[in-house]
Amino acid sequence: MEMNPVLPLAGLAVALALASSAVSLLASREPRVLRWFAMPLIGLAGLAALAAGLWALLAGGSANATLPLGLPWQPWRVRADALSGLFLMIIGLVTVAVGIYGRSYVRGYERGRDSLTALGGFTGLFLTGMLLVTLADDAFLFMVAWEVMSLSSYFLVAFQHEYAANRRAAFLYLLMAHVGGLAILLGFGVLAAFGHGFEFAAMREAVLSPGWASVAFGLVFVGFGMKAGLMPLHAWLPEAHPVAPSYISALMSGVMLKMAVYGFVRVVFDLIGQVQWQWGVIALAVGCVSALMGVLFALMQTDLKRLLAYSSVENLGIVFIALGLSLVFLGTGHLLLGSLALVAALYHAINHALFKGLLFLGAGAILHGTHERDLEQMGGLLRRMPWTGAFFLIGCLSISALPPFNGFVSEWLIFQSALQAWQLESGVLRSIIPIASAVLALTGALVAATFVKVYGIAFLGQARSRHVRHARQGAVGMRVGMGLLAGLCVLFGVLPTQVIALIEPVSVQLLGGGLPESGAQGWLWLTPISSDTASYSAPLTILLLALIAGVAFWWFLRGVPRRIRRSDPWDCGFAPPSPRMQYTAASFAQPIRRVFGLLFAIDESRPAFDDPAPRYRLKLTDRAWALFYLPVARAVEAASRRVVRLQSGNVRVYLGWTLGTLLVLLWVIS
Amino acid sequence: MPDGLVLAAWLIAFAQALLYVALAPLLVGWVRKVKARLQNRRGASLFQPYADLRKLLIKETRVPHTASPLFRMAPYIVFVATWLAAATVPLVALDLPVARIADIIVLVGLLALARFFLALAGMDVGTAFGGMGASREMLISSLAEPAMLMAVFTLAMTAHSTSLESVMSHHLADGFVLRPSYLFALGALLLVALAECGRIPVDNPATHLELTMIHEAMLLEYSGRHLALMEWAAQVKLLLYGVLIANVFFPWGVGREFTPLALGLGLLAVLAKLALLGAALATAEHVMAKMRLFRAPAFLNLALLLALLGLLSHVILEIGA
């Protein structure tokens, strides 16, 4: 039998990531190690992961292996199937770009005080953790890999720990990651108890009563939802993601959040198997809230990286809307629609990895060139950084779900599956799904507003501060990294039929059915259900756009004076506009802030009319803090104040407690 | 479909696309004319918009010093995206191949693409008015776009297809059935069309140099052929919405086969419907006053509510029946 190269390739990726980590240990002596060895190794690891993923998707089937590692009675089992292949591909695509980009980016740290050993070392471990999460075939290895991923990213968030805000964000992240990890562990516990083993194979065979299956679903939904940053468990995400170095933010938002999607799909669709439509309704509702609130908060932000982090909350919300739809359809016995929604969810997961990776790299290029994250200080960057500006525009168009870019295809697919709600028997479900699609439509429109704001404020207009006026174009490596992702955003938007053919094996593997009609009319036509129901041809859309543009140029501009004269802006004849007269990020968002005012906790102070030095102050906080986090924090504090009474300082009292505990334990286990 | 017919279909589709750009200024001229008559004025000629476009096209084009290359690209992108969106809406005949390239959702997406660049172009020069227009446009559209999608979803769920052709064929085959969901969707789409095309009561197309302007504020810095393309795109968009309402809700008369008679009748029918709609628009603008900007969300929420009611009344009342 021919040997399946997927696992060796994936193993190579892990080995390269670990090698990058190991070589970074020398960085304290020679900082250039990071640039010359560690980052290229990361890029190569990405390439190997990409090859493994593509092979797993194209060749089909699955490969198993048992590693001579782990506990004596519990060796680590790894497996690569279509689902892990897809996520290996996502890791690979973004990591390759990050490897190229990071080589130029880390140069900026070489003269700084921050520890490059920590940066390079934990980047390699972080990648290792993510790769192993997709490969794990037993709960034990999965949790180990999950923790490696969470812990190493904690250290990356805390990289610039001299700022108190970063330490606070990192601690919050660590705390939430562990609460989530605990929920996942308990979820695996339920499955392992019924399946009599920690191997995924055993869990798949487990027969769960509907009640216990729902308990397992609830636990893993909380655990993976926490990692995915779903509302209301999202509050750590906009704190933690922005403070890491930008290419790490790209990996965290673009790839690590996808690991939560992977975990959710693996456990719910694969291990639990017998899905119930009620779960779908829960996922749908949580997804809707996350999507809408995520984009509204994103729109209100003025810190570019924080804005992108909130937008990740929104995009993961969209992925969970699609997963919820899939669960509803599967739970009511509509296999084809269930696989359509699952494919849409996975498509959006890939897309989000691509465009969010691109946008974070772009934000990093701006940070690198101007040392600025605040939108209010930016402006006119398109002329200073034309390449970054062009790639960032592609990212903005993709994330705003505009045709013919990739974000549009996945949202189109989600709408298509939502529009099949008429096939459901239950009137309640038939009404819930259209409301969810209304929320999705509103979200999409607000995303466009958000990214018009980002691009318009940062790249267009005039510079609002001196250092932005003198921004430097980034190094070639940074541009190549961004260009790679931008090209993929276009490619995944123009060739949806091929991408779906790539994702389809996942649906076939998990659900036993794909989308037989999706490419039935040829590669030009995307017809997910049937050609009568809906069809979209991205290549022809592009072709016609180009054709019409050509005709327009040729026909309308014949004989028209071609000369263009430069002049001062007119601006209704007012005084020549200064950069301070431009709309700012906060003022751009003001109308929407006013319309959706009830959802935010707004603290605004306007200057008095006769104030000689007028200052306008606006502070906007997430209501989730007051509603969900502060009560918990207060309860923990109150509980610990009670517990502290035990600490009397008297050894005899402590010994008494120890004896008591021992007795209780003996009584429990006997 | 035999090859000859396919070729004919493509030719008709192409002619129809040209018809959109050719007819768009006429609709604007007609609306202005009716409005003038209602105000006891004679008004300009029906063909005045053509003369305006011609004048703008031959005039010198000026670009501010502070503009980036995006400023010069935007008019072409806006025009082309709007035109392609319009080309997918059946004007005189059904069974055209363009309908399969893009369904209703793609149509909304193409309009969103045009709007994205329009708003960016407004912000490009860095004037106060441009940013104001862009910000307001995005507010209006972020409320109007979901209402529009919901309204067309109502139709799509009735016809079990998101292709406009299938929706119209379904409606034609059904005969005249008064569905409550259609009425709600029609109401929503009318409100959305007013908002999206920048008509009274949301925006005033006749105004310039006024603090309440939205669409005009984004175009302030444009001149010459750039302005011509932007204005033309706005006119095509108005025609698009008019045809969408006229042909989707009242599809009777549209050509079902590719004979000169059927196509001619289709053209006459759609022109008659558009003339009626244009007159209705002019009358509505004549009797209504422009709203304050922060009243517009209430107006659009009504549209969203109507659209959602339409969708719910469809899934609850009509599917079982």
Image (cartoon, coloured by chain):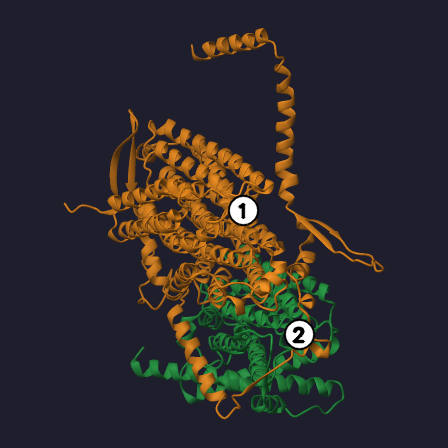
Point out which mark residue B4 bears.
none
Q: Tell me if residue A40 comes above or below residue B85 in the rendering.
A: above
Note the chain letter of the green one: B
Task: Please indicate whether residue A288 sits to the left or right of residue A50 in the image.
Answer: right
Note the chain letter of the orange one: A
Q: Position of residue B149 (x, y in %)?
A: 54, 63
Quadrant of residue A530 in the image? bottom left
Determine whether the residue tagged by mark 2 lies in a helix, strand or loop: helix
Q: Position of residue A124 (x, y in %)?
A: 38, 43
Seen as rendered, the residue at the extreme right is A610
Q: Nearer the viewer, residue B182 or B62?
A: B62
Confirm whether residue B283 shows in the render. Answer: yes
Q: Tell me if residue A222 comes above or below residue A643 in the rendering.
A: below
Q: Number of marks in the image?
A: 2
Q: Residues within 10 Å of mark 1 (few under 14, many from 20)?
A: many
Q: Chain of mark 1?
A: A
Q: Position of residue B58 (x, y in %)?
A: 56, 91
Q: Which residue is mark 1?
A: A243
Give amino acid for label 1: Val
Q: Position of residue A511 (x, y in %)?
A: 34, 47
Seen as rendered, the residue at the extreme front is A29
Q: Chain of mark 2?
A: B
Q: Which residue is mark 2?
A: B217
Q: Tell me if residue A398 comes above or below residue B169 in the rendering.
A: above
Viewer-nearest of discs 1 and 2: 1
